[in-house]
Amino acid sequence: MDSALIPEGAKRCSFPKFAIGIAVVGAVLLWGVFAMLLCWIKGLNQTNMNDYYGFALWIWADLAIIAIGGGAFFTGLLKYLFGIDELKNIINFAVIIGFICYSSALLILAIDIGQPLRGWFIFWHANVHSMLTEVAFCLSCYFAVLTIEFIPNILENPKLDKVPFFHNLSHNMHGVMAIFAATGAFLSFFHQGSLGGVAGVLYGRPFAFREGLLIWPWTFFLFTFSAAAYGPTFTILVTKITEAVTRKKLVKENVINLLAKISGWMITIYIIAKIIDTIYWAVSTAPEMGFTFMDFYSNNPVYGVSILFAEIVIGGIVPGLLLIFKQTRENPRLRLIAMILAVFGVCLNRWVMVLQVMAVPVMTFDQWAMYIPSWQEVATTILPVAYGIILIALCYRYLPVFPQEQELYAGNEQGAES
Amino acid sequence: MKVDRRCFLGLGLGVVAGAVVSPPGAKLTDDLAIWTQNWPWTPVPKDGKVTYEKTTCSLCKGNCGISVRKVGGRPVHISGQEGHPVSDGGACLHGISGLQYLYGLTRINAPLKRNGDTFEKISWKEAVSHVADRLNTMRENGDADKLACITGKERGSIPELFKRFMKVYGSPHYYSMSDMNTTWRTVAETMHGVNADMGFDFENATHILSFGSGLLEGWGSPVNNFRINAGRKDKGGKLVQVEPRLSNTAACADRWVPALPGSEADLALAVCSVIMKEELYDASYLASYNTGFSAFTRLVASTYTPEKMESRTGVSASDIKSLAREFAKADKPLAVAGKGRGENAGDLREFAAVHALNCLVGNINSKGGVWLNKALEYLKFPEEKMDADAEKGLEKEPEPSVASLVEKIAESDSSQIQALLLEEANICYTMHDVDRVKKALEKVPFKVSFSSFMDETAKAADIILPAHTFLERYEDLPSDPTMSIQVVGLSVPVQKPLKETLNPGDAVIRIAKAMKGVIAENFPWKKYEDCLESGTGKLWDALSDKGYAVVSDKAPAKSVNADLSFFSVNNGKVLEIAGDRAEYPFTLVPYDNMRITSSEVVSSPFAVKTVSDEEIKGKDSFAQMNPETARKLGVSQGDRVKINTPAGSATVRVQVFEGVMPGLIGMPRGLGHTVDNPYVARKGVNTNQLISASIDPNTGQDAAFGINAKISRV
Amino acid sequence: MSKQNTHGKTYKFGMVIDLDKCTGCGSCMVACMSENNVPFKEDETDKKDSIAWMRVYKLTNGKSFPETEICYLPRPCMQCGGKGDHGHSPCVSVCPAVATDYGHDTGVVSQIPVRCFGCRYCMAACPYHARYFNWWDPKWPGEMEKYLSPDVSPRMRGVVEKCSFCYHRYQAARDKAYYEHREEIHEDEYQTACTEACPAGAITFGDLHNPSHKVHQLVKPDPHHSGRPRNPKAFRLLERLETNPKVYYISEKEWVRKAGDNYLEGEWKKMNKKHG
Ligand SMILES: Nc1nc2c(c(=O)[nH]1)N[C@H]1C(S)=C(S)[C@@H](COP(=O)(O)OP(=O)(O)OC[C@H]3O[C@@H](n4cnc5c(=O)[nH]c(N)nc54)[C@H](O)[C@@H]3O)O[C@H]1N2
Ligand SMILES: Nc1nc2c(c(=O)[nH]1)N[C@H]1C(S)=C(S)[C@@H](COP(=O)(O)OP(=O)(O)OC[C@H]3O[C@@H](n4cnc5c(=O)[nH]c(N)nc54)[C@H](O)[C@@H]3O)O[C@H]1N2
Ligand code: SF4
Ligand code: SF4
Ligand code: SF4
Ligand code: SF4
Ligand code: SF4
């Protein structure tokens, strides 16, 4: 039915099957869209956010998405600037994931702000001192870059590729992609960093506040570094999930392992930095403001030191080490565990840097604030996930995303899903 | 280049993106933002010329001077009036919320007549003749004494007009709501043999010993007391607060002495015994002006020694002694009683015992002491003309208090009271055992309410003659009797009446004029304002000029006798609160919170907004208890518990508070209204539902300060 | 943070609240609501979404009966000067759209609801919880719209609001002085609604730069330390965060002063030795 659109030689499931799959995910998407409309029409009273939790689930989702979407800029950086050519086999997918993450982040921000129709004030009346201004500019610019990076891949769709203009455009864009990748890497570096800066500059919030370099708090660098380190693990994880769903090998092991190895080293270095940062904060920054380390981890039902342990050890040291060592890295099961733990670790870090910041009392007579998201918040947070699945499905079906797919599975049995 | 569907879509998207950054797109984007800045559903208040008008607040008996800021003739903000003798620039949160009363959601728009379960709107003419016809018929049937009238206030020309109406009509049943001043007047009569108001010169006292008086909770004239307290802090005066719960007054005091609830009289007498024993009293004063001194000395020396009173009061003998010494040795000591805001009558024995302290230190009618002020008598109305029916009706004895009147109605089979006039008296909310009050009222076949708002009592009325709010009317407002100085304030309209309402004074005049016999003749005024102007006589010039008149600001002559024989005679008559301790092991004591009104006036939305989430949470209110009490009950902060008392039961949440005596349960007064205003009503429990009346055997007044209670988890 | 019109007189407006006098009566809260058109909802018992530019906190000394003490602490916006008192208030420095700004001529932190797009970053930045978001469209039931003051625009849903030190009163005083050809406004010409309302006289307001003003005399701000109080009984909330508030508190009670900030064990004694 849609065979003309499917890349030549690729085996895809039947259209009705595909359509049903999309419809199921689409229903979830519609649920999210409904919640989103509620928030826009009725206002943010639809959420369980409050004056203590001005930043909540969405901002966490935003930060987490951006962090794990970091695979795009980092893989791009490695391929185009450091010339690690094997990565060309996964770069398309990394870009798609990045595109999904960044477009989702923009959407979430558009729902999160109280006056979406005035959202552009952030550009028009920009306050250059605000980390959020930096976030907005970098986010938008990098999204534009990701779109540009994504376009050649779209144009490779067999039908589009037949249009000579698109064919040529696509070809020429590939030629200049290194420039975009470099720009993207630069923008994303600042974007990831400024997201870290969002919490780190809050000198009224001792739990979040960090000293730093020039105008940038340490969290600025930690966020950039962690996104670079953890981002590829998510790219690999999604690749693996896609492989599992399609029951096809899409990317060669050596490519995966290379990326995993780089990621493992990066995570390990990051986590050392994070530990140093935490210790310095615990023994110097916070006590200068009158807080002991345990003030941030006691007297409340949720945030104990176990959170810190989970983030640093389970979500940091463990995956880092698993990916450094060849034996564990090349063991598919352990590698998968490492990927899952890593993604968990970086998401937990973002949770802590948003939600725990809001929870900790600063005035001595204030109390820990707890928060449970409303269904509208959950639905709008799942919305990008559903959207991502659909976009990946569409891309996988209609675009030559994985250059190695045919080589790997030429003549193999037919894939099931998608 | 062939343009297929997909390509077209792509181009379309590009066009949209381009449109946004194109000039018309940018304009639209900008217009949308501007639209959000001018949403038609976000009000834009009208501007205009700014003016200020002075008037007097009468939301409570404080009668503070207030200033109303108007913009283009529209009142927008209320603040205190600088230099006013009562409040000097201050105003409390209720007064400041005044405009939320003016535009109140439960305001009654026009006269109403009951029709089954609902009301129907009628004209003033119909309303007046309806009431007058009914009262005329009763009187013709010889039932003049079956009309009763309750006003909230007791003084001023409006209550005076009601009182006059009742007299010439021929009914003895005119009442005003009792409060601590009712008891203070009995103290003045019993201990000094004078008919006087007792004023307290806190301003000049250097040591105030307060037996639970909520001087910062709204006692007496609230703002006046706030200002005096601040002045005391500046001057270094001391305040000692005796109270089983850490109230705001106790928190601001220099010393807090938690004594068992209901033991205040014994504690005061124990303090007296120390003063006597150590001869710390004012011998020169007592030498010339006393009765019953030696009997009193013997009584306190034998019965009320600090040691004997230790367990009764929960205060150690050494603390009692130090209380006595600090008090008696102070330069200008002053003792005061009247629990909380003093909105209920007090226990005479307790008031007298506390006042005995004042007598012992000889502060009567002196600077910093208690002033026996002659009751204000500035109103001059023409002598009443009485007819035979009136004379006959007045031969009947009135009840001692509204509580006994209600009791009488509740007890009687064929109603003793056939018609009831209710002005500024929301007795279906404010009286103890309020469910019993409501049932009693059902027996009265004709009830007339003069309320501005559809409060609990107006809802039960048969006819409502709605009054102007305080911001729309004239009224003379005598200051609270507990103030040392005596001031009359004038309320003037700052806003033309918004509804079809009348000044209650005008309503009475109109009813009287529609009555037969001498009644109409007794109300010669065309309108209330004439009555006010002629009635206030000499004071009118000052009133109309400044908005207030200071009637007296000096201590009366000191030569007044102190009679201490009350205790030797009445020692046995002790007030008991309801509930057997074996069955009801806890003591429930409602407390006053400045931010919640508990009078006939319902708190405003603003005021309710300020109430802590440990007092109201959603629809629940809280019961305060000591952590030890909570531990015993196995409950913790926020848990729901059921409180049972002999009067009723209610479900509340637990507030664990260190500042409340173990075994004591504190609940805020003024919650649980059932009026139709979701912003202020149906939040929490009306404590009056849980408290039964405790009649003081010495006065016949309901002086319940609490009740014994039991608590169970739910 | 942008430089504002600085010709003419500059001030540093501040507030001093005597906690020993404060009775917790709530007049300041209501005066503020009335003055500044603050809306109300049916249920205001969730204090985490209840707009109160002035909020009165209840502090306890944590001791058990009968040693318990309580103290009320009114909290308007602290009008933070930020680190070094240069106007980089926690909130101003983070607002991406300059919808809240530092007035270098007054020391007042403005809030422009029509500029604000509701990102709530400023709320995350403010440790005093002085900022409130309009989660709902404000509603004045019945005829209550009629009492709204034209001096302060009602805010729409989706934006942040906070105490402005009743800035419109400053503007009115400034205009009056201008008409009367005066450089400077008098102390009594600009007083906030809460100051005016407090029946206990616990709040004092004025120019912290002006030694003849009561606020200056009460706290004796130290110009070399960003206005830190030199009166040992005076303190600012969370002084150690270097937010440099312009709201000061005074109390004779040590536990109250200690509750104003966080201290490590033993630190309070060490830091307060000099004051005895
Ligand atoms: N404090 C404060 N300062 C402000 C502003 C503010 O709101 N507050 N607003 C700013 C803004 S937006 C503006 S536009 C400026 C305006 O600032 P200015 O341009 O200084 O404005 P005006 O004082 O209105 O007018 C200037 C002079 O022009 C004279 N004039 C009138 N008609 C004529 C004419 O036909 N020919 C000539 N030659 N002179 C004429 C007037 O008498 C007056 O003396 O002020 C800015 N400065
Ligand atoms: N009688 C008289 N009238 C005059 C003049 C005069 O000299 N005399 N001068 C004229 C001149 S020159 C001018 S420029 C005008 C100025 O007149 P207006 O434009 O009315 O001037 P402002 O009072 O400065 O600003 C209006 C409001 O905008 C708010 N505001 C600040 N930032 C923003 C934003 O980003 N978005 C929105 N929507 N609002 C914001 C401010 O808080 C303020 O309340 O007055 C004109 N009218
Ligand atoms: S104390 Fe009473 S009279 Fe004074 S402002 Fe408050 S309500 Fe009005
Ligand atoms: S108190 Fe909060 S809102 Fe006010 S200036 Fe300081 S940081 Fe900003
Ligand atoms: S919520 Fe408004 S004032 Fe606060 S940071 Fe965002 S734009 Fe600025
Ligand atoms: S200064 Fe004005 S805006 Fe601020 S709390 Fe006081 S009354 Fe409200
Ligand atoms: S008005 Fe004054 S006394 Fe009342 S709570 Fe506010 S600051 Fe305290």
Image (spheres, rainbow, N blue to C red):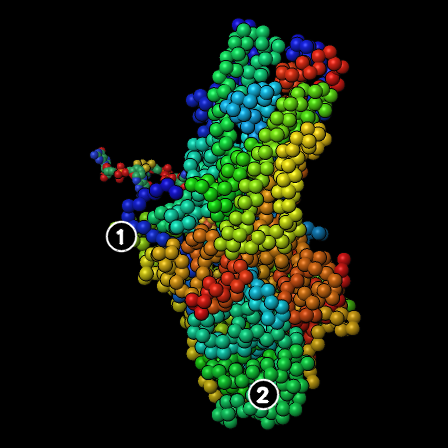
Horizontal and vertical percent for residue A84? 55, 22
Residue B133's x, y, as percent?
Answer: 64, 60
Which callout, 2 or 1, points to the residue nearer the camera?
A: 2
Judged left or right of residue B69, residue A23 is: right
Q: Answer yes or no: is residue A121 visible.
A: yes
Which quadrant would residue B686 be assigned to in this image? bottom right
Along the viewing direction, whichever of B583 and B286 lies nearer the viewer: B583
Quadrant placement of the C terminus of chain A:
top right
Q: Nearer the viewer, residue B685 or C243?
A: C243
10 Å neighbourhood of mark 2: few (<14), some, or many (≥20)?
Answer: many
Q: Amino acid at mark 2?
A: Val
CA neighbours of label 1 inside 10 A, class few (<14), some (14 to 19), many (20+): few
Going 63% across and 33% down the picture, which residue do you hit?
Answer: A324
Q: Is residue A177 above or below residue B657?
A: above
- Dot 2 falls on which chain? B
Q: Give me the residue at 57% from left, 73% from top.
A: B256
Task: Specify whether C208 is left or right of B575.
Answer: left
User: Is residue A343 visible in this depiction of the protein?
Assistant: no
Disc 1 secondary structure class: loop
Q: Quadrant of residue B166?
A: bottom right
**Residue behind mark 1:** C182
Where does label 2 land, which residue? B274
Q: Quadrant of residue B596?
A: bottom right
Compared with C161, A12 (above or below) is above
Q: Nearer the viewer, residue A58 or C214?
A: A58
Please tell me the numbered disc located at residue A11.
none
Q: Mark 1: which amino acid?
A: Arg
Residue at 63% from the left image edge and 79% from the top image edge: B315
The percent coordinates of residue A396 (x first, y second) are 65, 19
- Going 52% across and 59% down the picture, which residue do you hit? C263
> Residue B152's x, y, as percent?
59, 66
